[in-house]
Image (cartoon, helix red, strand yellow):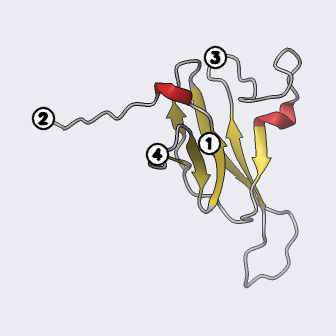
Amino acid sequence: MQPLTFHPPTCKSPYFNTYQPSSEIVSHCNPSAGLARAYAVDLLTGNPVGAEDLDNPNQSDRYSHLANTGIPPTPSILFPEGSKDALVCVGAECDPLEIGDDKQTTYWRQVR
C-alpha cells in the first residue's frame, strides 16, 4: 500500500489505508477477516481532515472503517467531469472531497 498525498490550496493531506488482521482463527484453510481503515490527516499536525471541531479533534475522526475486510487497495482521487469536487476512493468505496473552484487540469510529459 502506498499513501496518496493531495495538495489542495489550504493544506497537504495524505490519504492512506491500514489493515489489522483478526486475532480469531476461524479456519486454518481460510484467512480471517480483519479491520480495514482509511485515514485522512493534515500533514503538518496529524489532525483529522474535515473534522467537525478542529480546535478539539477526536482521534477517531482521523479514519473511517472500510466495508472491505481484506487488505485495502491504494486510495485514488477521481475528478468527475463537470464537477467542482473530487472523490477519494478506496476500491469501490468513495467519499466526496471538496476542492472548490481552484481545480485546474495540468498536463506533463517525461523528458529523458
Disc assigned to residue 111: 2
Q: Tell me which label, 2 or 3, sits earlier in the chain.
A: 3
Neighbour tally class for label 2: few under 14, some 14-19, many 20 plus, Cα within 10 Å: few
Task: Specify whether residue 97 is in view.
Answer: yes
Q: Are marks 4 and 2 in contact (CB under 8 Å)?
A: no
Query: What is the C-alpha distance between the residues marked 3 and 4?
Result: 32 Å
Gap between marks 2 and 3 measured at Cα: 32 Å
Q: Earlier in the sequence, mark 1 or mark 3?
A: 1
The total of numbered circles placed on residues is: 4
Whether residues under marks 1 and 3 lie with C-beta atoms below 8 angstroms apart, the answer is no
The residue at the point 59 percent across, 20 percent down is 11
Category of crowding for the residue at label 3, using alpha-carbon neighbours closer than 10 angstroms: few (below 14), some (14–19), many (at least 20): few
Residue with the mark numbered 4: 82
Which amino acid, by three-letter code, is at mark 2?
Answer: Val
Q: Residue at x 69, y 65 (%)?
A: 70
Marks 2 and 1 sit apart, C-alpha to C-alpha, by 30 Å
The percent coordinates of residue 58 (x first, y second) are 88, 29
Badge nearest the viewer, 3 or 4: 4
Q: Which mark is residue 16?
A: 1
Q: Nearer the viewer, residue 13 or 33?
A: 13
- Residue occupied by mark 3: 44
> Going from the N terminus, do you reach mark 1 or mark 4 first?
1
Mark 1 vs mark 3, CA separation in Å:
15 Å
Question: Badges 2 and 3: C-beta atoms under 8 Å apart?
Answer: no
